Amino acid sequence: AQKITQTQPGMFVQEKEAVTLDCTYDTSDPSYGLFWYKQPSSGEMIFLIYQGSYDQQNATEGRYSLNFQKARKSANLVISASQLGDSAMYFCAMREGRAGGSQGNLIFGKGTKLSVKP
Amino acid sequence: GAVVSQHPSRVICKSGTSVKIECRSLDFQATTMFWYRQFPKQSLMLMATSNEGSKATYEQGVEKDKFLINHASLTLSTLTVTSAHPEDSSFYICSAGTRGRNEKLFFGSGTQLSVL
């Protein structure tokens, strides 16, 4: 079974509108972290937002917010007031476990290509 | 914020040659670095975990003799693609993290390898 599922291969949004990118995850580990990254056409991976499994509140970073629904195992990214520069691939990722301070590694979803229309 | 520098950004080589890709953490010490591979329009797939001063841990299906990883210092990890073949053409990207910064892994800008 896939650990990270992003069901939207592509999404369109009108400039200045909000958009939600879906992400569901599968883990039996009670300790995990969820990440969203943006990958523009240049290829670099840009960290957007992080949510820890024990965090009580949904994470927010500027125009980005993470709609964390633990019982449903979903971690959707919400981008408010979309800008043309938001057009890119967006990846949801998970890291399981943090025992002993170890980093673990990231498991990535297949990504969603977001296109912002003027 | 923390910066990870990856070099070169693009390389074209002939089949049979070896290519070295460098990943440097510029303003922090990276005890762990990760190497990923990404095919066009695909997700990132972890190849190996590089730990400073010890052997890298490779993911299943990744040939350790073909993809040599060296993490000789706390700021540098290298990935060498030995005897490259056209099927090795891909986008390779590294990430680095350290204790105390568990919540964020910092990525390099990636290397596009094209083997002719």
Image (cartoon, helix red, strand yellow):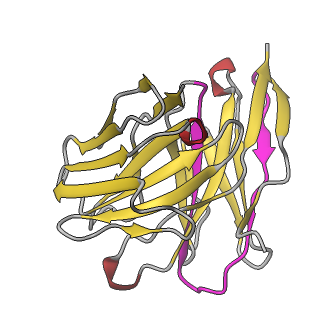
- Residue segment shown in magenta: A15-41
What residue do we see at 71% from left, 28% from top?
A82
Q: Position of residue B77 (x, y in %)?
A: 26, 51
Does residue B70 appear to the left or right of B59 in the view shown? left
Whether residue B115 can be seen here: yes
User: Residue extending furthest top?
Assistant: A118
* Outermost residue toward the front in this view: B16
Q: Is residue A60 above or below residue B58?
A: above
Q: Is residue A114 left or right of residue A45?
A: right
Residue farthest left in this picture: B73
Residue at the image position 77 percent from the left and 23 percent from the top = A116
Return the x and y of residue B21 as percentages of the image width and height.
33, 39
Question: Would you identify the image quadrant in which residue A56 lies?
Answer: bottom right
Pinpoint residue A2: horizontal percent, then vertical percent: 75, 69
Is B69 left, or right, of B62 in this rendering? Answer: left
Q: Is residue B78 magenta?
A: no
- Figure quadrant of residue B3: top left
